[in-house]
Every structure is written in structure tokens, then in C-alpha cells.
């Protein structure tokens, strides 16, 4: 094999006076290799070569070495030297599998344009490395200066049999345009998005979006920075192809043949991860889905007579906006205006005067992208004229039409209901959609699990007697206890709505957990009753037929059904089976009831 110091050191390195140039001349740098693992089967897919200096000195780690390269004006020379060190080490080991080497986009353009791709392939072969097993990992230490040149070079490199990867996507310097135009075989997702992903719903959603982009571009993803079992399990269940990180294998002198045992246990177990929930209700814009009336408007000089004609021409309009150069100034209510206009002598006295005098000069302006909470303010405002008079809809402050109170009520209600299907607004627990998705994931994985449906006994009388504020407290108590007694890594807690909850257990001691929830709820729910009720053992309230009768303390019933592999085909069937178990539990009284079991489990 060729010698780096004899055959490839440029003059700038031979004559350099800095400490890095001296290390390069002495061949004092070496490569370590970190595995890239196939998360689908636990095998080692490839290794990334990483440069190291002299241990125990400031110039040991890669960051310090690259900083020295910049300081000594040897950045491109150092990048190419690192590739040579990696190829030399890999060729000497003659290990199977792909090798990833880092190179900046500008350095790749420079070397191919100066020496040609044929010479680059010859260099790779000279170290006894097959070009088809080499992956050039484009780093973005600096911006791409000329995208067109890079695309031409990429075309040559790919024609020569080499593969391309994009490093640290999402680190703040990466470019979706670069991904789109280069179309690398591999994109490595920066550890910012993968670290603690088991706890961050936003990062989970970002990775799901990147997966969709990768599918469009025909790219495989590598999740970097995997350090915990929980993160690895989530990434595995996201069906990411590859992963890299200390949990899978650290950078070492010799390539790793097998994945670390701790990581292999996670990759091979049947436990389905609990995806982190967003913990908040969607606040997406409402008016994008609202039917905005494309209504004509009046100007500041429009007369009352002219406005009357407009109303007669458009009998469907409840109001007309007064607009000046696109900016809404006021709103004229149809009913109020036509009432005045119809009075005796009004046309003769005021007909030719500007209609602005009859307008509401403080109309409600609603920007088209207002979110739900801002629009709810209109519905709950003491000034209810906005519901009858309507409001003006703007886009970037310019008039686009009118909205009505009826439309607003309907739209806000629809968005709130849709949001509640994702996250319950009272408990912030996952709603119907995430519940169904998790059941599907459990079924797809062939997991055995227990589906439980929890419901409160005598909750309506309690809610009617004490009011919905205290009723909400009781529902939040159920949520709090469920989260406390379920294993966050194994068990899923969802809120269907009202006082109905779904628990999906993978914990083997699920029955004991349910019993603990039931028992602690019975104890702590007593604090939500007043002293008189606690002395009496319950409350007097109306039943569903309107008759007064005595109701005991509110308790919790949980119906459970064991779900085995292949038993059901759809999430809805599982939910229905759990609902039937809940019904049985309520018929038998408070506590845990296992559907199909011979008796009720005692609590």
C-alpha cells in the first residue's frame, strides 16, 4: 500500500510550521471506527472512520484537530489526509462492510475538479478498498459555494461507483435543497432530534416528517447520537433503517463485529415503545377551514344611497365593510342601516352623505391565521354584537371578506373536537387518534397486551351536585393516578373523553397496577366530597329519570381484556372488546373485572 507521508503530503503540509502539520508529517494521526447498525435486524451495516490525534494532548479529538487545520490554513489538505488515514487503516484490516468517510462538499468539488474522479477511484483502490464499499459523507463545515458545480461532481462520483451520505442533517447548517439535488443514498439525522426522543413529541414528529421526505427522495436514514435504551426502542419502532451512537458501539481501533449486548436486547425484544405525547391541544389556524364571505365593500366616500343599493343587490349580506386602500375601517350592520334608511325623510336628509357616519368604527378584525384560542374570545366576549354583526376577515391586514357568528361557532367547535381526538384538552392525555395508532402498533408488532377501559361510577350525580369544576378535578385525579401507577416505558394511558379512559398494558403486573389505581382513587376521591357527604356516605341527587335518591361515593371501574397475537384485525375491535369489559365491570360494581376470566379480581 502507498505511504501517506511519502506519496500524498502536499507542499503546504511538508513546509508547515504548525503542530498539526508536524503531526501529519510524522504520521501521528490514526482512525477509529464506529459502527452504523441496521435497526431492523441488529447487524452491523457499516463503520464511520473518525480521526484521532495523540492521546493526552490538546490535539486529540476531531474538533480540536479541525480547529488547528483552520488556524494553520490546511483545512482541505487535512480533510484529504483524514480520508487517506481512514482508507489506509481500513485497507489494512480488510474488514467486510461499508466505510463512511467525512469530506466537506467544497473539498469534494476541489479534489474532483483538480485531479478528476478517475484518480480518486485509483486512490481508493490503491488502499485495497472497493469503491462501491466507500460512502463519502458530506459534512457542512462551510456553506456550499457553488451548488451547480457540486451537482456535476456528484454525478461523476456516483458514476464511478461511490455512494454519498449527508451528515448531521438538521444541525442548523444543513439544507433541504442540498438533500433534494444531491439525492444521497444515506442521510444522517443530527443527534439534536434523536437525543431523548422518547421524551420529546416535537422531535418525534420531525423524524416522522423526515421519513416521508426520505421516501420521496429514495433515501435511507441514520439516527445519530443513540445513547439510551428508551431512545433506541422509539427509533426502532419508528422503523428507521439505521442507527449510530454509544449505546450501539463506541469508536474503537478495531471494527465491531457485533452490536453491544445491551442494544441487541432492545432491538430483539417484543416491547412496543410508548411514543411521547405532545401534551398540548392543537392550536392550528381556524379560518383556513372557515367559509369566508367574498363580500363587496364600500369606500370612505360611499353615500348612504349607494350603500342601500349594495344591500339590495346582495340580500345575503349581513353587513358591509368600509375599506380604504385595502385596509378595513368600519362595518355597517344591514339590519340597523336599513331600519334607519327606511325612516321618513332619511333619504332626503342623509341619502347623499357618506355612510361612514352610520358604521361601527371599532369592528372586530380577525386575521385569517388566528388560532382557536384567539377566536374563542369572540364567542365568550361580553360584547355579543360580533355574533350577530359578524366580523371582518383580513390577510396580512388587508380586507378579504366577512365572517358570521354561526360560521365561527361551527368552525371553532369542529377544530376543538378534532384537537380533542389528538390530545384531551382537560388532561392533555392522548385522545382517540393516538389511542388507535398505539393499538395498531401493538397489533402490528404481534405483541400480547391487555386493553383496559376505565370509567367512573356515579359520576353524573357528583358532577351535577358539585358542578363541573369539581367534576373536572375528579377526572384529572383519574389521569394523575393512571400515570403514576402505569409504567411510562411500557404502558399507554389515553383519555377517550369525559370520564372514560383507556389503558394499554405491556407490564406483566398490570392487574396489580389497575387495583392500585382503583384503591387509591377510592381513598383520594373522598376529599372532593364535602364534610356532610363524607359523614352520610354519599350525596342526595337526581337520577337519570329526575327523581331524588341517594348515591354512594364515586368509585372507579376498570374492565380488562387480554389481547393475543392475531386475535383481532383492527384497533376498533380491540376498543370495542375493552368497552364490553368496562360494561361488565360496572354491572358487577367498582373494581377490576377481567372479561373472560372466571371471576372478578378482588380490590
Image (cartoon, grey):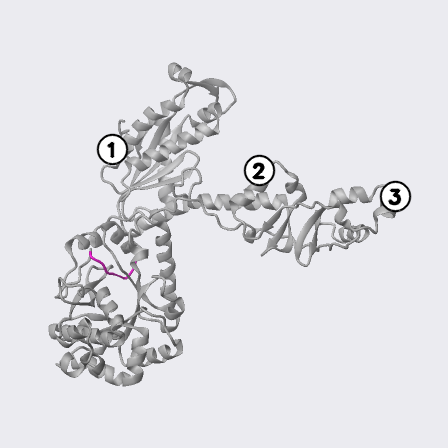
User: Residue 340 sits in which quadrant?
Assistant: top right
Q: Residue furthest front?
A: 17
Residue 222: percent from left, percent from top: 28, 62
Drawn side of residue 598 relative to residue 532, left or right: left
1 vs 3, front mark: 3
Q: Main secondary structure of the magenta part?
A: loop
- Crowding at dot 2, Cα within 10 Å, few <14 / some 14-19 / many 20+, comes out as few
Residue 345 drawn above or below residue 102: above
Q: Are marks 3 and 2 in contact (CB under 8 Å)?
A: no
Q: Earlier in the sequence, mark 3 or mark 2?
A: 3
Residue 461: percent from left, percent from top: 46, 24
Please identify the quadrant where the N terminus is shown. bottom left
Q: Is residue 569 visible?
A: no
Q: Which residues are magenta?
A: 239-246
Give the residue drawn at x 83%, y 52%: 352
Tag of residue 345: 3
Q: Report how far apart the C-alphas of labels 1 and 3 lie in the structure.
A: 83 Å
- Crowding at dot 1, Cα within 10 Å, few <14 / some 14-19 / many 20+, comes out as some
Question: According to the image, label 1 marks what residue?
Answer: 512
Question: According to the image, label 2 marks what residue?
Answer: 380
- Give 582 or 472, whichever is nearer the viewer: 472
- Crowding at dot 3, Cα within 10 Å, few <14 / some 14-19 / many 20+, comes out as few
Q: Earlier in the sequence, mark 1 or mark 2?
A: 2
Residue 373: percent from left, percent from top: 52, 44
Drawn side of residue 530 relative to residue 340, left or right: left
Q: Report how far apart the C-alphas of labels 3 and 2 lie in the structure.
A: 39 Å
Residue 250: percent from left, percent from top: 17, 60
Q: Are marks 1 and 2 in contact (CB under 8 Å)?
A: no
Amino acid at each position: 500500500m502507498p505511504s501517506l507521508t511519502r506519496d500524498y503530503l502536499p507542499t503546504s503540509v511538508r513546509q508547515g510550521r504548525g503542530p498539526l502539520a508536524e503531526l501529519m508529517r510524522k504520521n501521528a494521526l490514526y482512525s477509529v471506527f464506529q459502527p452504523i447498525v441496521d435497526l431492523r435486524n441488529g447487524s452491523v451495516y457499516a463503520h464511520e472512520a473518525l480521526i484521532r490525534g495523540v492521546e493526552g494532548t490538546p490535539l486529540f479529538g476531531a474538533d480540536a484537530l479541525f480547529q488547528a487545520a483552520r488556524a494553520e490554513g490546511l483545512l482541505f489538505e487535512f480533510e484529504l489526509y483524514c480520508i487517506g488515514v481512514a482508507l489506509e487503516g481500513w485497507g489494512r484490516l480488510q474488514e467486510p462492510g461499508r466505510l463512511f468517510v467525512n469530506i466537506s462538499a467544497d473539498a469534494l468539488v476541489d479534489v474532483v475538479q483538480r485531479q478528476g474522479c478517475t484518480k480518486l477511484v485509483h486512490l481508493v483502490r490503491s488502499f485495497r478498498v472497493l469503491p462501491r464499499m466507500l460512502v463519502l459523507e458530506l459534512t457542512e463545515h462551510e456553506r456550499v459555494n457553488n451548488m451547480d458545480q457540486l451537482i456535476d461532481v456528484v454525478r461523476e462520483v456516483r458514476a464511478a461507483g461511490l455512494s454519498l451520505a449527508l451528515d448531521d442533517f438538521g444541525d442548523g447548517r444543513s439544507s433541504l435543497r442540498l438533500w433534494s439535488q444531491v439525492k444521497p443514498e444515506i442521510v444522517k439525522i443530527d443527534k439534536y432530534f434523536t437525543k431523548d426522543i422518547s421524551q420529546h413529541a416535537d422531535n418525534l414528529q420531525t423524524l416522522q416528517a423526515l421519513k416521508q421526505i426520505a421516501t420521496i427522495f429514495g433515501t435511507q436514514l441514520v439516527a445519530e447520537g443513540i445513547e439510551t435504551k428508551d431512545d433506541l426502542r422509539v427509533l426502532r419502532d419508528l422503523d428507521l433503517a439505521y442507527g449510530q451512537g454509544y449505546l450501539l458501539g463506541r469508536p474503537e481501533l478495531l471494527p465491531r463485529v457485533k452490536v453491544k449486548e445491551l442494544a441487541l436486547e432492545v432491538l430483539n425484544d417484543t416491547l412496543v415503545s410508548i411514543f411521547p405525547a405532545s401534551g398540548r391541544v392543537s392550536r392550528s389556524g381556524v379560518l383556513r377551514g372557515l367559509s369566508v364571505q367574498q363580500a363587496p365593500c364600500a369606500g370612505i366616500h360611499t353615500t348612504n344611497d349607494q350603500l342601500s343599493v349594495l344591500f339590495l343587490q346582495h340580500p345575503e349580506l349581513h353587513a358591509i365593510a368600509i375599506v380604504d386602500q385595502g385596509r378595513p375601517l368600519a362595518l355597517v350592520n344591514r339590519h340597523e342601516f336599513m331600519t334607519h334608511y327606511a325612516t321618513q325623510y332619511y333619504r332626503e336628509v342623509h341619502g347623499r352623505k357618506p355612510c361612514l357616519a352610520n358604521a361601527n368604527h371599532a369592528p372586530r378584525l380577525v386575521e385569517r391565521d388566528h388560532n382557536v384560542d384567539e377566536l374563542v374570545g369572540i364567542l365568550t366576549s361580553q360584547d355579543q354584537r360580533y355574533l350577530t354583526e359578524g366580523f371582518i376577515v383580513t390577510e396580512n391586514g388587508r380586507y378579504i371578506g366577512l365572517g358570521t357568528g354561526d360560521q365561527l361557532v361551527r368552525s371553532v367547535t369542529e377544530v376543538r373536537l378534532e384537537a380533542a381526538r389528538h390530545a384531551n384538552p382537560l388532561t392533555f392525555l392522548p385522545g382517540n387518534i393516538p389511542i388507535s395508532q398505539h393499538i395498531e402498533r401493538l397489533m402490528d408488532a404481534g405483541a400480547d397486551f391487555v386493553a383496559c377501559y376505565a370509567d367512573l361510577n356515579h359520576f353524573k350525580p357528583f358532577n351535577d351536585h358539585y358542578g363541573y369544576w369539581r367534576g373536572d378535578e375528579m377526572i384529572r385525579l383519574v389521569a394523575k393516578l393512571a400515570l403514576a401507577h402505569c409504567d411510562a416505558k411500557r404502558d399507554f394511558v389515553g383519555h377517550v373523553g369525559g370520564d372514560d379512559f383507556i389503558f394499554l398494558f405491556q407490564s406483566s403486573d398490570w392487574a396489580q397496577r389497575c387495583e392500585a389505581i382503583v384503591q387509591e382513587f377510592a381513598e383520594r376521591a373522598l376529599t372532593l366530597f364535602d364534610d356532610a357527604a363524607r359523614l352520610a356516605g354519599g350525596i342526595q341527587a337526581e337520577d337519570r329519570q329526575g327523581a331524588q335518591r341517594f348515591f354512594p361515593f364515586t368509585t372507579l371501574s376498570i374492565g380488562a381484556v387480554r389481547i393475543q397475537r392475531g386475535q383481532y384485525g383492527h384497533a376498533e375491535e380491540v376498543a370495542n372488546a375493552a368497552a364490553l369489559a368496562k360494561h361488565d365491570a360496572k354491572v358487577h360494581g367498582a373494581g377490576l373485572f377481567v372479561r373472560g376470566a372466571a371471576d372478578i379480581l378482588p380490590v
